[in-house]
Image (cartoon, grey):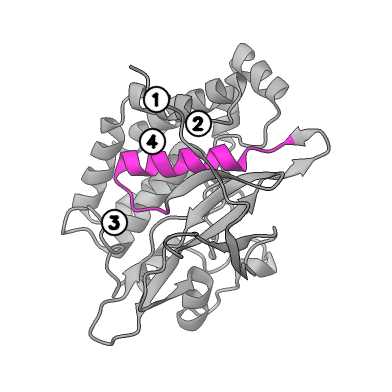
Amino acid sequence: MALPSFPVLDVTDWRVAAEEPAGADEKLWLAHPTSDERWLFKPITIKGSVVHGEDWAEKAASELACALGLPCAQIEVAVRGSQQGAVSRNLRPAGYDMHNGAVLLSGLIDGYIPGAHNPTGRPGHSLENIQTVLRDALPPPNAQLPSELSAFDTFAGMLVLDAWIANRDRHDENWSVLHPHQPDEPIRLCGAYDQAGCLGFNVPDPKRQQMLEAGGVAAWASRGTAWRFEHSGKPPSLVSLAARALELASPVSRAHWIEALLTVTDDTVMEILHRLPVLSDPARSFASEVLKINKERLLHECH
């Protein structure tokens, strides 16, 4: 029996706790009415007659991350008044401060230029430098991962997810570390977050349908580049970056993430896509095809 659609939360009456200064778009931190937990509301983008699908895309990304066993933010599709969007549950536990990659790299890496300055080639935001700044960190809190995996091993899993879902937006503010207030507690990588820019969320339905009918999805997927990471000349593909991250990671990590990807069946993927409440048929078919193609590319390059 088919599972019901994921719920759409009405957050119209949730209290505004704060505004989120990071990012280009307006976002609000809301307080859950019963638990007072903080959730970040992010409205979708509307450009002319084209409605982008950040809401369903980020929900899909979170569910696919869970299917991989990758720690990530809980996402729910939401409405606030007349605005469609999604809410992301706060990943920062009590007793911790959250510092993004730009803060970490600025303090430790010579020659690094923050991505907010839009530098050519993203100098300093490299896998090797990320591995360096994560050296003393542990995986995210409550992560259900093999005990041998390090923080960088977990970060490599994030890049596997990005390559699978065609997320090109893992910039230096879209990954973070949790610093404890108590000195005897360990520093930890934060779970994955802010993954709405995936699965062709902003491709219009007529274009999706055209690519599906003409066999153009594979060419579209191949253009997914890791332009947010350090590169000289043409940036590497998302798949190549994920494969290189697994080469730098531990052998246990490499085996773990490849096995995790193999374990996610087509039926599981389609179940997730069919449960998304605000997804057109062309968008669902396009996302399904992207996931199949990128899974094959990852397994081919990582084996």
Q: Is residue 202 left or right of residue 235?
A: right
Q: CA distance from mark 4 to mark 2?
A: 25 Å
Which residue is at the front of the view, 36 or 133? 36
Answer with mark 4 or mark 2, whichever residue precedes in sequence.
Answer: 2
Q: Is residue 84 left or right of residue 226?
A: right
Q: Identify the disc placed on residue 271.
A: 1
Q: Which residue is mark 2?
A: 276
Answer with mark 1 or mark 3, whichever residue precedes in sequence.
Answer: 3
Labelled pair 1, 3 in contact (Cβ < 8 Å) = no
Where does the magenta region start and end? 51-73
Q: Which residue is mark 4?
A: 298
Q: Identify the disc placed on residue 249.
A: 3
Q: Nearer the viewer, mark 3 or mark 2?
A: 2
Q: Amino acid at mark 2?
A: Leu
Q: Which image quarter holds the N terminus?
A: top left
In this rendering, the answer to whether 280 lies above or below 147 is above
Q: Which element is circle 3 on?
A: loop
Q: Using the rendered view, name the quadrant where residue 64 is placed.
A: top left
Q: Which residue is pictured at 56% across the width and 62% down the height? A: 30
Which residue is at the front of the view, 278 or 63? 278
Q: Identify the disc placed on residue 43.
A: none
Q: Amino acid at mark 4?
A: Leu
Answer with mark 1 or mark 4, whichever residue precedes in sequence.
Answer: 1
Q: Is residue 9 left or right of residue 211?
A: left
